Structure formats: C-alpha cells, structure tokens
Amino acid sequence: MKIFIVITGSEFTMGLKQEKNSLFISREAVKRGADVIGITIAPDNIYSIQYAVKMALDKADLVIVSGGLGPTEDDMTREAISEAIGVPLIFDKDWLDRIKQALKEQGRQVTDGIKKMAKLPYGAKKIENPVGRALGFIKVLDDVNKAIAAVPGVPSEMRPMVLKLFEMLKMKELAGRIHLFRTFGKPEAEIDQILHDIDGRVLNSSPKGVDVFITDKNSFFLQNKVAVVRERLGELIYTEKEEEMEEVVGRLLREKGLTLSTAESSTGGLISARIVNVPGSSEYFMGSVVSYANRVKTDVLGVSEKDLMEYGAVSEPVAKQMAEGVRKLLKTDIAVSDTGIAGPTGATPEKPLGLHYVGYADDSGVKVHRVVFKGERNDVRMAVSQYALNLVRLNCR
Amino acid sequence: MKIFIVITGSEFTMGLKQEKNSLFISREAVKRGADVIGITIAPDNIYSIQYAVKMALDKADLVIVSGGLGPTEDDMTREAISEAIGVPLIFDKDWLDRIKQALKEQGRQVTDGIKKMAKLPYGAKKIENPVGRALGFIKVLDDVNKAIAAVPGVPSEMRPMVLKLFEMLKMKELAGRIHLFRTFGKPEAEIDQILHDIDGRVLNSSPKGVDVFITDKNSFFLQNKVAVVRERLGELIYTEKEEEMEEVVGRLLREKGLTLSTAESSTGGLISARIVNVPGSSEYFMGSVVSYANRVKTDVLGVSEKDLMEYGAVSEPVAKQMAEGVRKLLKTDIAVSDTGIAGPTGATPEKPLGLHYVGYADDSGVKVHRVVFKGERNDVRMAVSQYALNLVRLNCR
C-alpha cells in the first residue's frame, strides 16, 4: 500500500513550529508494511490543501491528511477534501447530537464553527475522536481502490485516531520490518564501516550515540540481519527498544538493589535530571551535588584544595574525589562524577575544548576516564551525561 | 516570491528521523518576505523527487531542494532535477579540481561518487559549500521567472548555503514580518483571549510557556500590533528574542552581581542543568543539591526531620527549608527550591498529581509558592523549572 501524508498548518510553512505528526504517521504506516511515498505540508489555505491532496491522490492508494479539522475559519481541510474529490459534506447526526449534548451540559452555545466539526464527506466512515470534538473520517473513492482519510492535528487526538484508522483498514503491525539498536561508544562512520554489508540500514547520530535502524520488507531476512548486527555491535548496544539510557540503567539498578548518586560539574545536574526522568527512580536514586563552583567541590564534596590548585578543576584527582565525596555524603553504593570544559571558552594548550574526566565509584574503588567530546556546549554535556550513565550500565550488568 | 521546499530522505518518510531542515529554510524565507506555499518530503527515489520537484515548480517561483547531493547511490537529487527541468548535468571544473586537490593531499582516491558532487545543471550558478564537498546550485529556468536551487541535507552545510542563496537572490531580511514574544504564567487559551483582536498571531504552547508570534506583511502595521501586545501581556513576557528563560535570568544575575543556587527534589537537577546551559554561568551559579531522597533533605540541606514526618516531603515547610538550607550551604545571594509530585504516581486526596511547592530565598527571607501543573511527568518537571527560573526573573528585575 502506497501512502501519501498531507499535513496542514501555516505555523509550519512559516517556520514557526516544528512539524512532528508526519513522523508518527509514517513510522506507524511503515511498521504495518506500507510505503510512505511522500509527505506534503500545506499552509492553511484551501487551494494549497486541495492541490496537495490532488497531487497525493494521483500517486498514492491512501492519502492521510492531518490538521485543519477544528472550529475556526483557518480549519479548511474538510472543504478542501470535499472539493478535491468532488463529494459534498454532510453532518454525522449522531456525532452532532453528542457535541450538542456535551455543550448543553457545560451551558455553552453551539456555534457554526463547532457544528462544522461533525461534518464529513458523503459516504465516508467516521473515525471517532476519543479526546476532542473534531470528527475524523475515511472515504473510499469511486475510482480504483483509492481512499482519503482525515484526522485532527492535535497530537493527543491524532495518534489514537491514526491507529484506529489502520485498524479499520485491517493493517496490522508486522513482526519484522524495522529493528532498532541504540548504541553508544563509537562514531557513526565507524559503525557504518562495521555494518557496511548490511543493506537497508539507517544510522542516526546524536550526542546520545548512534541509533541503528535495520529495515527489511521480509521479516525472515530482517531477523537474519538483526542477529548479525547484534553480534557485531556487542556491548555498544545499550537497548533494542525505543527507550533511553536512563531507563536501562534504572532497570539494572533496581534488579541489583543498588543505589546511585552523582557529583556533577560540567553537566550541571543533567545526569541527575535524566535519571529522575524515569518514574520510580526514587527507589535507587538518592540525589546529587552539582558543584559548579570550586568552593562547593571543597566544602560540600571534600575535594582537596591542594589538588584543585595543583591539577586544576578539570583533572583526574578532582573527578576521583568528587565521586568518592558524593558517594560518602549521600551514602550510596555507586556514584558517578564529571568535570570538564564544555566550551565555548576555557580551553588551554594542555586541556582542549571538550576534555572531560568522568569518575565511577563503587565499593571496589574509583576509576576515572579521560574523554574528549567535540561539538557545541550542550551537545558535549549531553554526550558526557550519556558516557556517565553508560559507565553505570557497563559496571552493573 | 512564492517558495516551495522539497526535502529528500527515506529516513524521514520511513519515520526514522525527525525532519528539521524545512523549519530553518521556511523561517529564513518568511523573514525575507517570501511565502512558503508548501513543503514536500520525498523518499530517496528518483521518481519521487522528480514528481515533487515538478509539482513544486508548477506553483512556485522558486523551489529549494535540500538533501541527496552526497556521493552515494541514494543521492539522486541532481539527476532528478536534471530530468525534471530537462537540463543536462555538467562538471564544475573549478570545484572538481579543488576536490581532487584536497583528496590528493589526504592520499585518498577520487571515486565516481565523489566526482559527482561537483556536478550541476548546465547554466546553473554554483553555491559553494563552506564545510563539505557537495556543491549547491541555483538554475534559472527558461520559462517565466522560475528557478530551482539545491543544497545539501547536512544541517551545518545546508544553513550557510541557504543564507548564501538568499544573498545571491538579493533577498534581505526585513525589519518587520514576524515578532516573537515568549511568555510564562498564563495558559494558551487565556493569552488567545487577551489577543483575540490581533490578526496574524500564532500561539505555540509548551511546558516553558506560550510563545506568541505576531506576523504582518507590513512592518509598520507589525510594529503597531507589537506595541499593543507588549502592553497587554506586560510582565508575562520574559523575552522578545529567540532565547531561553535561563539566558534572561543569567543576564539579570550578572547585571546585579548576584549569585544563585538550587535545591531540587521533583525537578531532579533540571533547573541547575538549564542554568549551566548558558556559557559563563559559572560567574553567578554556584551549584545545586538534588535531594531526591528524604535523607539527603535532612542530612545535607538541614530540613527538619519532624517537619518531614508531620507535613510530608511535598509541603510548604520542606520547600522553605530546602531553599534556606542550600542558600546557606552554598553561600549564595539567592536560592530556589522545589518539591512536588511529578507523577504518574504518588498523589493523595490532599496532594493531587502535579502539586508542587517552589521556594525562593534571598536576604529578605523565603517565600514559597504552591502550584499545580497538569501533564506528563517530564512536562510537569519542565514547567516547574520554568516557574522557578521565572521567580528569579521577577524578583531580580
């Protein structure tokens, strides 16, 4: 099945807002074995939407339109589709009654704008909105196995309605098609070299590492490839699910019954903030000392003033004492620490931009790792936080 | 000028990667007075790209294609454009020589794939790549004032080359057109009500508040609207630039020569991590204590064990003592604190999901604010961090 996605919204074509719905729709479509042959974003203008719909229908079996189903004058998707396919709009009586009833209970008026949200092309099947009032629909066209569907643009409404649409079309998620490996520890070019003979790989690099998508239309072949990739990437893989490093680490800590604390300088609390992203993290995470100023390193964490003077804040002994200090202060099994130069300034001939010392302490002692990350300040700090969490993962398996 | 943007990449149509280049290109185009009449994302397939280019050229004065100019077989944008406009590709000798020279110096071979990156349609003007090897170009078509341009998809190459393209086209950034107000403190619906009579407003809501874009094609009328909006929104506005709350707060603290620390429970270090997002924050930010466990609240911050027992961790006295405790421990002028229930669990009949106490301490004492934020765990925590930073802003003006 060939799918074309049309997104409406002048906020996107004016560059005022990042469009994200098409990512969800295409991902879900591809999981169900469909090919997304294009995505068009049209401004809130009936002619632009109509043109996009016609061009999409010309090539695709199914066109999914998201957005423009609300109550305002800017919401013109229904009208545009009606014109494009030459089918008039009618009220869905049942849905209109439900809207009227709901508004009556709230003591609110039923405006024309609100009524409009119960309209759909004649002969279309409705897709009920579990959150809001705008009705979605799918209309099978007279000519040759083509259909057009519309769902709202509000993500919390769009998502369940797109899944409902695929259900109505009997498009089930396939066992294979895409497999995700999230890796940390090697740059994209190196991973690409390791996997040079694996077709259908898509690599996606970020400060959190390299995500490797392995794709195949045949699930048997996909599983073969997946086994090879798993073998080759080994412990670089921190998960094969759509989850974050902090979730993996949280699971390991909970399994082992271990507690964690952090002492952060360069990352400024980012490691800690990521750890508490995970619901239930209070079971294993005690807290953190962000020792941005040297005085906090010495006064709170007990870092030696002499070492700070002699080796500087960005040094192996300081990272070591920070990890030891916070582990003792917060009484945890494990502690991680970091100190470094995130940039854009602060580098010296001996200490390049991006240089970091990351410490890991547990009951067997402390180990400090020297690493250099390239990039913008916040990317560097994200990479350091990922490195620190990865140390916990590698040491707690 | 009507612009249509075409983005290439199967990673986008497969839902494997968020497409972001079109946001930058359309924003820059709109700033220069152009209308973006559509954006199409095409998979890496010569027919799909060709179709997208043709449909775009049919309606627009200028089509900008991003992506698919690299050395691999998947990179087919040049060929697709050449076919679509019926103009053959030729080598830019000068650029080819430069590539060859660079590779020679690195002792690397010049493959056909690499050579391809020096090709452009006959008669096109080249857009030099300041970062990589792929040449961009703009080709004016024979028929009626239409042109097509191509730039790479790598953001660090795409951005300067798009700006160069606009420069070549003498498209200067206009004084008015879009004005941004970033606000915090009222929900989107309320802001929309306040601005109900201002045409061309686009509201963008997030846990960080509501961004209000005021647009007008005429800069005189834009300035009139901007003055009205500024008056009406007043101190809800934390900036009128594309900057974050932590940058605003950082500027204020530096101006006043004040230092800051944080004591975080629910936010888990997020406030601190955001403060150090700003280069030079070490001038005013000393550090943070993330007291996720109650033991850390009592042992490190000196929160009364009795009050913790009596009122619970999510309470006004605890927030108060956390702010006082960290201000004393880290010896700062100002301290903020938070304790709350970010969810998804932990609520009680008296303490609903999203309830937070946010403390602000300075030399005149401590004030604690009780707030409730709705939403997912991480959205709630982001909103709390924004609330705390906003307290610093409002108190340090």
Image (spheres, coloured by chain):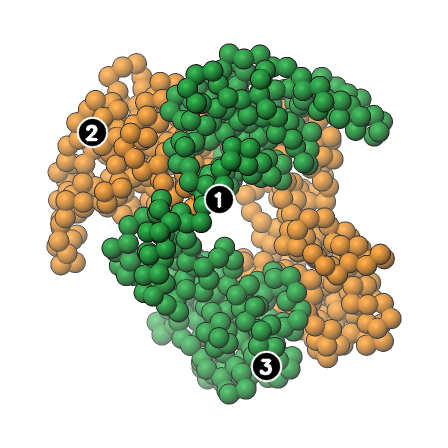
Chain colours: A orange, B green
Counting from the top left corner in percent of width and height, residue B259 is at 61, 76
Look at the numbered disc 2 and give the secondary structure of its residue: strand
Q: Amino acid at mark 1?
A: Glu
Chain ID, mark 2: A
Does residue B97 appear left or right of residue B48 in this picture? right
Residue position marked by numbered label 1 in the rendering: B173
Residue A249 seen in the figure: no
Residue pointed to by mark 3: B333
Q: Are marks 1 and 3 on the same chain?
A: yes
Counting from the top left corner in percent of width and height, residue B306 is at: 51, 87
User: Image check: A379 left or right of B62?
Assistant: right
Which disc number belongs to residue A121?
Answer: 2
Q: CA distance from mark 2 to mark 3?
A: 64 Å
State the separation of the CA atoms marked 2 and 1: 43 Å
Q: Is residue B201 above or below residue B208?
A: above
Q: Mark 1 or 3 closer to N-term?
A: 1
Q: Tell which tag, 1 or 3, sits nearer the viewer.
A: 1
Q: Is residue B281 above or below residue B98?
A: below
Q: Nearer the viewer, residue A210 or B114?
A: B114
Q: Is residue B98 left or right of residue B342?
A: right
> Which is nearer the eye, A57 or B317?
A57
> In front: mark 2 or mark 3?
3
- Of residues A88 and B239, the one drawn nearer to the viewer in this rendering: B239
Residue at the (62%, 50%) spot, across then down: A245
